[in-house]
Image (cartoon, rainbow, N blue to C red):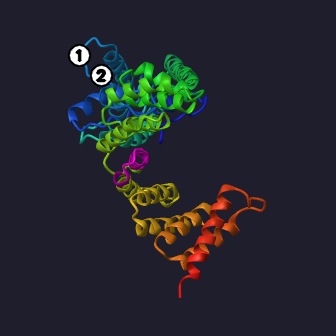
Amino acid sequence: MRRARGFSYGHIPSLWITLTRHRAPDIRFTDPRTHHHVSLRTHHPTLAQTFALYHQAVPIVTRLADATNLASVATYSCLGVPLLLAARGTFRGAPCSSGATSPRALGWLAFLLLSFAPASHALLPLSFVIAERLLYVPCAAYCVLIALLQASFRRGGRSCRLVSRVLVATALIASGARTARRNCDWRDDASIFGAAALAYPNSAKATYQIADGLVQRGQVEKALPLLHRSLELEPDYHYAYLHISRIAISQGDLPRASAFALASLKAVPSPNPHAHALAARSFLSQGLAADAAAHAKAALRMSPDADRAPLVDLLADALRQQHRWQEASDALELAVRLRPASAEAFINHGAALLQLERPLEALPAFRRALALLPAGSNEGVVAQRARRGLQAASRRADKIP
């Protein structure tokens, strides 16, 4: 499964880290008002999240004294004061000095505002993944403005130079402390996703990733409640359906496995080859060969070549159970092309050809299977199947006039 991961810039303390190292959430809804609201509350460095969140993971404002609102106001105030000083330096002269104006500041200020407009959702609502990428440019412009402001302070008197040094030191120390604190969450997947779940308990993504880690460590019983919780938070979160379906197959609960595979297909109809493959496996094990074949064909249409071999075997099994030997032979011929070093693939293809009464074509398949077997494996099950198939094909070929 694909995972949404964030950025980590090591231990380098800088204002750039404070402004950009925490990724904005990937909130997938289309209401522009919600986009603008969440943009206000997440496009600032007080939120310590680095990956996708969904729907109401960031709650809507219900009262003005909400702590997150206060943090947003404080953050934007800190961002706005240097911009105002830079603008003042442009039109009235540099701060703390009576020097010349700074036309460079005006250019960078315009660059910041123009580049920030798309990411702010002021023009139109964007995916937060896209908006996040756009934030790097205004962050760079902001850093240049801070540098110009700091240079103007240095041209002033002793008090202005002292203020400049204090501001730079504060920014570096705060950024370094924030980086060090955040890096503690990056020890492993469990810590990063656990930190996310604590910060956003309504995040289906964070809940799912914790469950995924538990499944990988074999703690399936602990993972199942979290997978169901992620579906409560995000009913269309199809990765959770896939995980539950896989677990159900491993536990032998085939009706449940097929139900969750179909639920994943309802959430994401296409492309969703994994759900089709799970549905095919569960239906085939239940004896529903026709349904299994339909889902196996759908999975094959959506899968890249690297993932097709197991699906072809699944399709061939479903077709053989229905005695559709010609289609099974075609599928097994594809399996041979996908796995030219597999003796079992040649044996299965030869067996299908025998069912079609084509022994002359089956003979080379069984001979190739025997040639692929390693030395000393003449008594193995695969070798015995290949020899029996070769003998049957030879007897039938001898009867052909």
> Could you say where residue 274 lies in the image, as x and y percent from the top left?
42, 47
| Marks 2 and 1 close (CB-CB < 8 Å) | yes
What numbered label is drawn on residue 59?
A: 2
* On screen, residue 387 above or below 40: below
* On screen, residue 55 above or below 334: above
Our reading of the magenta stretch's main secondary structure is: helix
Mark 2: which secondary structure?
loop
> Which residue is at a point 55% across and 67% down the rendered structure image?
336
Look at the image and tell me whether residue 401 can be seen: yes
Left or right: 187 with respect to 283?
right
Q: Amino acid at mark 2?
A: Pro
Q: Is residue 283 magenta?
A: yes
* On screen, residue 303 above or below 198: below
Instruction: Judge the density around disc 1: few (<14), some (14-19), many (≥20) Cα neighbours within 10 Å.
Output: few
* On screen, residue 99 above or below 75: below
> Could you say where residue 198 lies in the image, as x and y percent from the top left?
44, 19
> Could you say where residue 271 lies in the image, as x and y percent from the top left?
36, 52
Mark 1: which secondary structure?
loop
Which residue range is magenta in the image? Answer: 274-291
> Which residue is at a point 65% across and 71% down the rendered structure image?
368
Left or right: 394 with respect to 194?
right
> Could you say where residue 312 lies in the image, as x and y percent from the top left?
47, 59
Q: Amino acid at mark 1?
A: Thr
Q: Nearer the viewer, residue 53 or 13?
A: 53
What numbered label is drawn on residue 62?
A: 1
Residue furthest to the top:
65
> Which residue is at a point 24% across and 42% down the rendered structure image?
124
Left or right: 215 with respect to 119?
right
